[in-house]
Amino acid sequence: MGQPMGGPLDTAWLESLPRGYGPEMPPSAAGTLALAAAGADLAIADANVRLANSQRVPNLEAGPGLRRLSGTNDTALIFTVTMPIPIFNSGKASVAQAQAQRNQAEAQKRMTALDVEQAITDAQTAASNAAVTAQTATGPALEAAQEAARIARIGYREGKFGQLDLLDAERTLSETRLAAIDALASYQNARAQLERLAAPAPEQGN
C-alpha cells in the first residue's frame, strides 16, 4: 500500500484454520459481481429491444397553422396532422437484431452463472485441501520436529549426541516451520480467492 506499518502483524489471523472439513456453503452465483455485470448487459439488451419496437410506431404530429389564400386575400386557420408511413423500412430488421443481441446476453448470463459456480466449487476444493495440508504441517509434523529438536538439545548438553545430530534436528525443525508457514499462506490465499469469487455485488446507489 506504500504506507509504513503502524503496529505489529496479526499472526493469529495467519494461523487461523477451519475446524471442520468440506465446503462451508453450496456454490451459488446469485448476487456475485460477475453475475451482476452479466445482468446489467441483459438489462441493456432489453432496453434496446424496447427502443427498436418503439421506433416502429409512426410518430404522429399535429398542430395549428395559418395559410394565406391568394384568390381572396384572406387568411385561413388550418389544422395539420402528419404521420409517416413506413414502406421501405418497417423497422423489423432493427427489432430482430436487438432481439438476437438480447438472446445472446441472456445466454451469456446463464453461462456466467455456471462459470462462477464452477469457479466457487474449485476454490472451495482448493481451500479445503490447503486447510488439511496446513493443519497437518502445523500440527503433528511441527510438534514432532519441535520434540526432536528439544531432545537433541538435551542430549547434546549431556554429551549423548554430537553436534551434527543437533544441527540436523535444528535444520529439520527450521524446514518444518517454513513448510508450515507456506501451508498457512497457501490456505489464506485460497480462502481469499474464494471470498473474492463469492463477494456480493455492491447495491445500486452506494
Image (cartoon, rainbow, N blue to C red):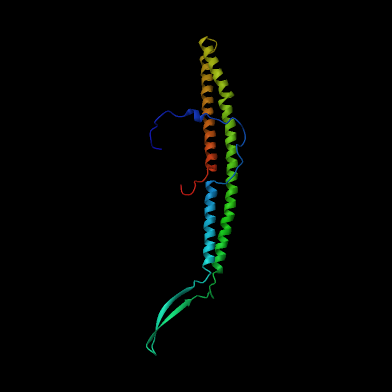
Q: Nearer the viewer, residue 163 or 143?
A: 143
Looking at the image, the residue that sits furthest to the bottom is: 71
Q: Quadrant of residue 155?
A: top right
x and y, in percent, of residue 16 in the image: 53, 30
Name above or below for residue 74 compared with residue 169. below
Q: Is residue 173 above or below residue 53?
A: above
Q: Quadrant of residue 87?
A: bottom right
Question: Residue extending furthest top?
Answer: 158
Residue 197 vs residue 164, the one in the foreground: 197
Q: In the image, 102: left or right of 3?
A: right
In percent of the image, x 43 and y 80: which residue is there?
78
Camera-nearest residue between 143 and 120: 120
* Residue 45 picture location, percent across and down: 53, 59
* Residue 82, x across and y down, in percent: 48, 76
Foreground of the two, 198 or 71:
71
Q: Looking at the image, is 182 positioned above or below residue 47?
A: above
- The residue at 52%/16% (across/down) is 166
Q: Which quadrant, please, contains the N terminus?
A: top left
Residue at 56% in and 21% down = 143
Residue 157's x, y, as percent? 51, 11
Q: In the rendered view, would you say 58 is above or below 119?
A: below
Name the quadrant containing residue 191.
top right
